[in-house]
Image (cartoon, helix red, strand yellow):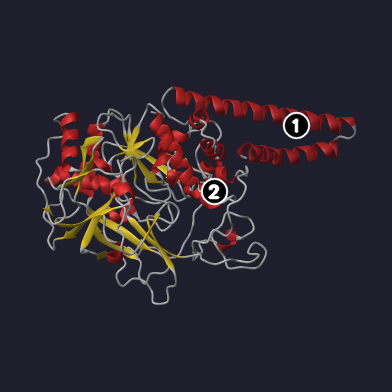
Amino acid sequence: MRNLRLFSSLLLLLLPAMGYAQSVASGSDLTQIVVTSLVVLFLIIIVMLVANSFMKVEAQSMGVSKTGQGFGILPSMDQLFAKDLPRGVDKNDVHFLRQGFDLNLQGDAEKRVIPRVGKTYAVKPTNFIGMSPIPKVEPEVGSTVLAGDVLFFDKKNPDVKYVAPVSGEVIEINRGEKRSIASIVILADKEISHKKHNAPALTGGRQAIVDFMLEAGVWPMLRQRPYNVVAKPTDVPKSIFVSTFDSAPLAPDLSFVVQGRDAAFQIGLDVLNALTPGDVNLGLDGSANSAKAFSQAKGVKKHYFRGQHPAGNVGIHIHHVDPVSADQVVWTVGVQDVITIGQLFLDGTYDATRYVAVTGAELKNPAYAKTYIGAKVSDLLEDQVTSDAGNIRIISGDVLSGQKVGADDYLNFYDDQLTELEEGDYYELFGWLLPIAPRPSTSGTFPNILYGDYKFKADTNSHGEKRAFVLTGHYEKVLPMDVLPQELMKAIMANDFERMEGLGIYELVEEDVAICEFTCVSKQPLQSILREGLDVMREQG
């Protein structure tokens, strides 16, 4: 597309000269001038494009740039017309992502904090991919625990401890199918008491830090790509990634969340630096000013990303900065997890405080709730649901990749967002044909481009049933990665291991293809399909 624009621009510049030639020449002379001009123009374009490509390749080979972005004699359209970049950021430092799609929904969380100290909290083993269905549970019902005391561990990997987010009494050990452990529920104390640890010095060696993090219970906050599983303590990642902004619908503003916790965040980054011989990579928003804790962070490499969702996904950052493979892993950590790790090394306590964005159009005053990991959903929604709200769905996470939960359920371990959405339990006759209310859509049938920043009130209706899985090219328009998602999904469904690997399955997790699932005209459950493929590849070793 950029080359076509360049050709058109040069052709427009040449038209006046051709008009002048027409006024002074005729017949065969005019034909000769036109043909010669077009040939010269074509040769100039070829030379410029080849030179541009060679400069990018040279930049990559010299290690100046992993992608070649920002190098070349031809600026990209994004670089040429980039506006409103963050303070002190050069356009050559920004990854401009052309693919993506933003769902502008009603119900953003206001930047104010409401204390939500609930009565009960839970940790759910099912939140940790690959864990045994029946882990070893340490406390019994009726026993008391401190925040940071061990609740359970995986029998296959006993070194990784999963600990209590709050102090109090263990009142329930709930079981699911085949007696699997579904959740461990704690009735919290009014004043939270913490187990005390003696943190090692960061100069004391990597193994001492690893052992301490395992014992203190913060290790599950480190996740590994590929597969998005809890990191293996015996692995050494080639790099670690932290995304400081979330582009998902109604996602929390992490620059707001980190305020007042700058010191713990920086210490957390220092700890991560001790865990890898490579870089700790910080992904920052290329379209807005970030909090000082992010923009002035030390000991990290900063990478700016600008574009529509999923620009904030850490998987997108990994793909463009330091891609993974089967035998080259990277680790990822959430911003609030980095803060918890840093706080542990600051004062020796496991501080599971979380600022959760409670969002949705069905709420009275969407805001941020200050609570702890595993908060009860009904506590977060207390006095928030409007009186005229109909049948609603509660989602732990965002509307694209979150999980449906009930009011008596608990927030998932890695989630810092709770979303309410109206159920789409209705049929729409000839919805594609009749004039209907505006809705978020990538289809040209809806003139959404005319609505600007209009915020839609969406529901869960998929507006169609599952149908033939045909190639459409829709996924590639919203996924800013050099993979072929539709071909990959078909390879997974066919259980073709070699094609799955060759098509880039190691680079993806569910949240990366969630936007593809939203745009899917075949209504395929792409996230479920991808997880099946990832589990198969992980089991194959």
Between the residue at mark 2 and the residue at mark 1, the CA separation in whole angstroms equals: 48 Å
Dot 2 amino acid type: Gln
Q: Which residue: 28% across, 47% down?
A: 125
Residue positioned most to the right: 27
Where does the N terminus fall, quadrant-wise?
A: top right
Answer with the quarter of the image where residue 240 lies.
Answer: top left
Q: Is residue 429 left or right of residue 318?
A: right
Compared to 540, does 405 lie above or below?
A: below
Q: Can residue 425 be seen here?
A: yes
**Label 1 environment density (alpha carbons within 10 Å; few <14, some 14–19, many ≥20):** few
Residue 227 placement (x, y as % from top left): 38, 37
| Residue on which the image places disc 2 | 524
Foreground tag (2 vs 1): 2
Q: Could you tell me residue 449's position as x and y percent?
A: 58, 58
Nearer the observer, 123 or 477: 123
The residue type indicated by label 1 comes to Leu
Q: Is the residue marked by circle 2 packed among few (<14), some (14-19), or many (20+) residues within 10 Å? A: some
